[in-house]
Image: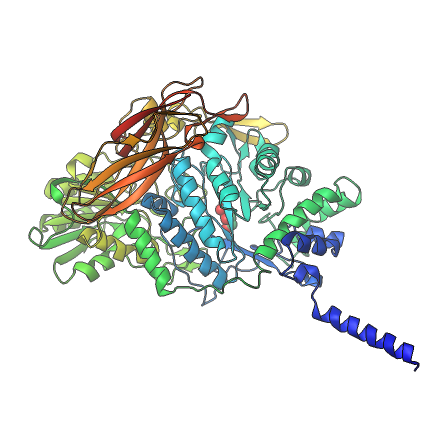
Amino acid sequence: MKIKEILLSACALFAMSAAVASPPVYLDESKPLEDRIEDALSRMSLKEKVSLLHAQSKFSAPGVPSLGIPELWTDDGPMGVRPEVLWDEWDQAGWTNDSCTAFPSLTCLAATWNTDMASLYGKSIGEEARYRNKSVLLGPGVNIYRTPLCGRNFEYFGEDPYLASAMAADYVRGVQSNGVAVCVKHFAANNNEANRYTTNSVVSDRALYEIYLPAFKAATVDAGAWSLMGGYNLVNGQHATYNQRLVNDILKGEWQWDGVVISDWGAVHDTKQAVEGGLDMEFGTGTDGLGTKGNQYDNYWMANNYYNGLLDGTYSEDQLNDKVRRVLRLTMRTAMNRNRPWGSINSPEHHAACRKIGEEGVVLLKNDDKTLPILKDRVRRIAVIGENAIKRMTVGGGSSSLKALYEVYPLEGLQARLGNEFDIVYERGYVGDTLTFYNNVWTKQHLDDPRTPEQLTADAVKAAKDADLVLFFGGLNKSDHQDAEGTDRLTLDLPYGQNELIETLAAVNPNIVVVNISGTGVAMPWLDKVKAVIQGWYLGNETGHAMAAILAGDVNPSGKLPYTYYASLDQCGAHKLGEYPGTPRHDPVEGDIIDMHYNDDIFVGYRFTDKNKLKPTFPFGYGLSYTTFDYGKATIDRKKGTADDTFTVSIPVTNTGDREGSEVVQLYIADLKSSLPRPVKELKGFAKVNLAPGQTETVNFTISRDALSYFDDKAHQWVVEPGKFEALVGASSADIRSKVGFEIE
Ligand code: BGC
């Protein structure tokens, strides 16, 4: 070989080894994300691009095997990581290592009014998802609590867009710090479960922008959620999952969001609408399972149909590339991120987080004669009555159903904490729901009871008579028409004759505390006849411990209601003015649908009760403590300014009781005169302060443009009108302790 040839081959060898040593751009994490995406895109065939956009199993999408781009695994969400299911079934696969920590319901998280709790929740559940190798956690749900009957209220953050936004944003940041994407759902105006596939929410732009979209914007734009799920419903005549206005114009247009829009499971009904309406990934479309007719996933709307449409020029490759880029971006942010932490599951920290969030979220609604906490000088014998003291609540309710490693029931928690000091007896009182299996997850309980209703009542009455204190654990559960996906409740009343039972028990022992376990409001016709009431939510694994800590007084309650507790459905705008549950209509394009006009418009929750001067059972933002708080005088740092100025409102708050406690101090803004109708006041700030007895702290709030503006739908812009405003500071929406005026010039 001549010298020149030898040199050339040496160079070639060197070049080859260099090529082996440096990975292609798309795999090189030191390169900018967008360069990696373009590189991967340029290496993909049309078929591979399309295959990225739809599922290959119930919860996964295939990635691009030829390029080593991994599968994308999703899982529910939002209160724990769902057990593994069979490839194409809802039923669990029967693994033995997929039990999770079940965290409290999201309504409970909202009731903490503490964004640190939202961060802790997000970080912890994200760690569990990461450990289980999930790239996308299907949650949080941020739909607004528009009616107390909605079966999924327990999965959401309550009625107020400001509170829901603040809590959702920190939940999202917490989850994604693990390299696991959230999938914020269900976009948008998806506010009931009855007729969920056919409801057409007819809603004004103003209500969308002011009430129904802010939490989505906070999650996607402010907190940078990497994916979002479209709802089953239609919005103003178009399917939400691929709604031109919602997805293309607002989410991807105005908000310039770069994440992935995922369909709800089975929410796609048409290729053209889905492709053009901004959908990026299709999941859950009905199939008959792999194997019987070939790969049914090829028959998805966004699979072969889409591919053929690309070949014949119906769809453009540019449009396809935008979707593919988004999915690649999501995959690189998660499954292809080699630097993400490993995660952990069922760690002591997660169980402690579950307990802490539960303890902070429980709301004390009534406490006459200082009945709570339970003290030894007044009580020796406690009768615990009610099914919910012994019922497993982490199983059931729809896609949020879990296989929790353990669940401490309220009765067990009480026995563990108070059993040595008090006589505790238990009576069931009623038989409600005896669910044993859900999606093949076993509750590990046999709740059948041979007694007649009369006998159950008689036994409960006897136990109540013999006791110094009755703790009634009732409320709802996770079965259909209660707190459950796919159905709404049929009434505001408690089921299984609980109203009558509570009255009967109160008649024989007025020293009765009702603990309502639910994720939504219920009617309380017996309220005057009981001494104390607690809103207990669903608290996950640590239910019994958290509940016992509150009842025993180890923890001072500090939760406040994230929604208005209506006395009757008439007090709720959706029912009083609205069309709930809708009016059936035949649409030439969509077929049989159900129109639901949102006539309550922006007047949802306290915005409606304020406007109509109604007195709900308990107002939004309400909750008691075992101590008391005094509010001083609110002051503002300037009396006049422009819309671009910031104002600081300050108020001293003092713990005037004899024990440490936390208070949620709330700031509402009232626009005293405006061209468009505005709510009497709106929540625009909150702070939770922990105070020792006698301690005073000054709480400061910053008010800027966002807190003052309303959405002018004709001009399509947020507007701050000059004129007089008031800053109202209080302990709930109906308990304003001090106000201070200011003016925008
Ligand atoms: C629910 C979603 C859920 C999905 C996957 C749907 O029926 O509406 O919230 O994430 O199923 O389980």
Please provide percent x and percent y for residue 290.
63, 58
Residue 716 vs residue 102, the one in the foreground: 716
What colouring method underlies this structural image? rainbow
Report the residue at 10% width, 54% height from top.
Answer: 381
Please provide percent x and percent y for residue 8.
87, 74
Q: Is residue 420 above or below residue 14?
A: above
Q: Quadrant of the N terminus?
A: bottom right
Q: Is residue 328 visible?
A: no
Residue 280 vs residue 18, the one in the foreground: 18
Quarter where residue 680 is shown: top left
Please provide percent x and percent y for residue 418.
16, 59
Q: Is residue 519 left or right of residue 192?
A: left
Give the residue at the far bottom of this rendering: 1
Residue 444 vs residue 79, the one in the foreground: 79
Report the residue at 34% width, 60% height from top.
Answer: 351
Q: Is residue 34 visible?
A: yes
Please provide percent x and percent y for residue 111.
33, 43
Give the residue at the far left of this rendering: 377
Q: Is residue 715 left or right of residue 107?
A: right
Number of residue marks:
0
Give the residue at the far right of this rendering: 2
Q: Quadrant of the C terminus?
A: top left
Q: Is residue 430 left or right of residue 461?
A: right
Q: Is residue 650 above or below residue 640?
A: below
